[in-house]
Amino acid sequence: MKLSVSKNIATLIPYPPGKPLKELEREYGISDSIKMASNENSLGPSPKALAAIRASLANLHRYPDGSCYFLAQALAAKLEVKPEELVFGNGSNEVIELLVGAFVAAGDEVITSHPSFLVYQTMVQARNGVNCVVPLKGMGHDLETILGKVTAKTRLIFLDNPNNPTGTVFLRKEFEAFLGALPETLIVVLDEAYVDFVDPASRLDVRKYIHNQTPVVGLRTFSKAYGLAGLRVGYGIMRQEIAGYLHRVRQPFNVNELAQVAALACLDDDDHYQKTLAMTHAGIRWLTREIEKLGCRTFPTQTNFFLVDVGNDCKVVYEKMLRKGVIIRPMSAYGYPTFIRITVGTPSENERLVKSLAQCLQE
């Protein structure tokens, strides 16, 4: 077989999927493992979402609503934006793909930071765009250096705020100064996947910037605070004109029926939402205190995860933890060879993690 594949696709590194939990347990001979690596909601989905899913199962022979009409109406009312200013996707990942597909042609430039969410650079390379990557400064986005990288070919700037994997945020004053110095020929994409966990005093109001001279698009998801990672539903907040271009490249029926009804139900379950935030913030405080007692260095975060410098090869620590049935994320691929990333779990999961980590470090 002699296929002709463009260099940008041939050299693309696929996103590395983790092994299924059951397969890891079989491979390592363990059971009752806990997963604290993927920044999921350990409380699970909203009970109202589960009820809505069960009520919709009989309709699975029908195509989903291609416009996400009811979800758009409810979310627009909650956010105080127009329904036409929302674009839904199969996770916020798809909205990233739509933005790149609509605005990036071969040779166009996109600025991202490193480390940050890997999907930005993957999508740009797939479109034969040019990735301009700026290292983080003090574990946060270096807005000054990013500004200096802007050229006439720059089409998008991706800023995950909070940043993944560091959990840091930039504040309103520095962002507005940055935004004011940019040309109006590009779009700034604020990826706010973890915005629900951010201290309200530190949050940006993305709605304030979508009609800015240099337009801003906000990305959000139901995967984190709302516990719907397995259904893949996210959205973008943007001016209507930009949304129109994304709809031109969007596949029809891209958000499935169960995802739509579950997301709609989540918006009406503030009790589950508040429990998630309370558990997360309490877990961060407890885990930080207990892990520091082990001699490790923890880093402040505005998310449901945080970084830990264990002072050892993180791959070795990951393997040892895995054999104890606790799955964490080694950070060597992000340029932090002694760091691990931990997602906040339930109180019992947090206790088990600390106990296992103490044993691993003693070994």
Image (cartoon, helix red, strand yellow):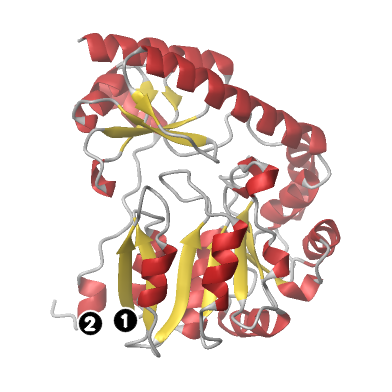
Using residue 195 as the reference point, say whether residue 26 is left or right of it: left
Give whichever of 253, 147 is nearer the camera. Answer: 147
Disc 2 to disc 1: CB gap under 8 Å: yes
How far is mark 2 from mark 1, CA to CA?
9 Å
Q: Position of residue 19 (x, y in %)?
A: 34, 38
Q: Position of residue 274 (x, y in %)?
A: 75, 33
| CA neighbours of label 1 inside 10 A, class few (<14), some (14 to 19), many (20+) | some
Q: Quadrant of the C terminus?
A: top left
Using residue 132 as the reference point, say whether residue 187 is left or right of it: right
2 or 1: mark nearer the eye: 1
Q: Position of residue 321 (x, y in %)?
A: 30, 21
Residue 16 in sight in this render: yes
**Disc 2 or 1, which lies upstream in sequence?**
2
Q: Secondary structure at mark 2?
A: loop
Give whichever of 279, 28 is nearer the camera. Answer: 279
Q: Residue at x 41, y 83 (%)?
A: 154
Above or below, comparing residue 65 to residue 339 in the picture: below
Q: Secondary structure at mark 1?
A: loop
Using residue 220 as the reference point, say whether residue 4 is left or right of it: left
Q: Amino acid at mark 1?
A: Asn
User: In this figure, which residue is indicated by the disc labeled 2?
Assistant: 6
Q: Residue 118 bears which disc, if any?
A: none
User: In this figure, which residue is indicated by the disc labeled 1?
Assistant: 128
Q: Amino acid at mark 2?
A: Ser
Q: Position of residue 69 (x, y in %)?
A: 80, 67
| CA neighbours of label 2 inside 10 A, class few (<14), some (14 to 19), many (20+) | few
Using residue 76 as the reference point, say whether residue 333 is left or right of it: left
